[in-house]
């Protein structure tokens, strides 16, 4: 999920683009009806070309920073080398693999994994929801071992850090977490 800076930058870019499009639409509509109206004259921008050039350079720099904030967080992928090349695997696919490995345990009702790629290896957290009366420490240790083994088998490298956070459900909570 994108962070706050990415969402704010996206919002500012969309609002700026909408305002510029509206101003140009106003100018073009006025030109279509033969009027000399232009909303750009009401912005208080000096008519000196050097001032307009510096203003335009500043606007371009601000837009470039906003675009960088929006586009810097692409989908994380991990390169898995093979005999005839390799394949890029999204971190989300590895997270699904980790959640499936955790769900194979008989005392796990549901699992959610969040993985990132750090230094060429998966790294992240697995949240597990266990059956009532299960031992959380034992369940966390068993799940961590199972998920580490499964990821190491697929990726070829054991996860750098894998935090397993168990939550033991009560009987009334079971119906909300069952698949």
Image (cartoon, grey):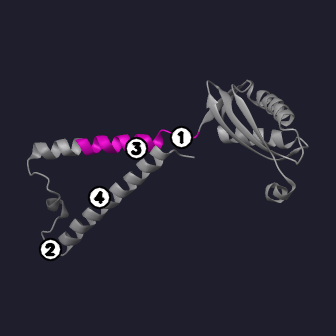
The first of marks 4 and 1 along the sequence is 4
Separation of marks 2 and 3 at Cα, in angstroms:
37 Å
Q: Element under label 4? A: helix
Query: Where residue 74 sits in the image (x, y, percent)?
Result: 53, 40
Question: Mark number for residue 20?
Answer: 4
**Labels 2 and 4 touching (C-beta < 8 A):** no
Circle 4 crowding by C-alpha within 10 Å: few under 14, some 14–19, many from 20: few
The first of marks 1 and 3 along the sequence is 3
Instruction: Decide whether residue 126 is among the magenta residues.
Output: no
Q: Nearer the viewer, mark 2 or mark 3?
A: 3
The first of marks 2 and 3 along the sequence is 2
Where does label 1 land, which residue?
Answer: 74
Where does label 3 land, which residue?
Answer: 67
The secondary structure that dominates the magenta segment is helix
Q: Element under label 3? A: helix
Question: Mark number for residue 147?
Answer: none
Instruction: Provide the residue span drawn in magenta.
Output: 58-75
Separation of marks 2 and 1 at Cα, in angstroms:
47 Å
**Labels 2 and 1 touching (C-beta < 8 A):** no
């Amino acid at each position: 999920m994108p962070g706050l800076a990415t969402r704010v930058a996206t919002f500012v870019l969309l609002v700026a683009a909408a305002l510029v499009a509206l101003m140009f639409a106003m100018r073009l509509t006025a030109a279509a009806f033969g009027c000399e109206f232009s909303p750009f004259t009401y912005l208080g921008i000096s008519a000196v070309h050097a001032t307009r050039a510096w203003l335009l350079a500043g606007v371009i720099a601000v837009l470039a920073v906003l675009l960088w904030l929006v586009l810097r967080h692409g989908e994380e992928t991990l390169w898995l080398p093979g005999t005839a090349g390799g394949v890029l695997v999204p971190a989300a696919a590895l997270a699904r693999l980790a959640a499936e490995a955790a769900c194979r345990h008989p005392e796990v009702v549901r699992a959610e994994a969040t993985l990132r790629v750090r230094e060429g290896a998966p790294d992240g957290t697995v949240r597990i929801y266990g059956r009532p009366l299960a031992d959380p420490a034992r369940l966390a240790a068993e799940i961590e071992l199972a998920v580490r083994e499964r990821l190491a088998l697929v990726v070829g490298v054991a996860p750098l850090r894998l935090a397993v956070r168990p939550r033991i459900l009560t009987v009334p909570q079971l119906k909300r977490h069952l698949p």
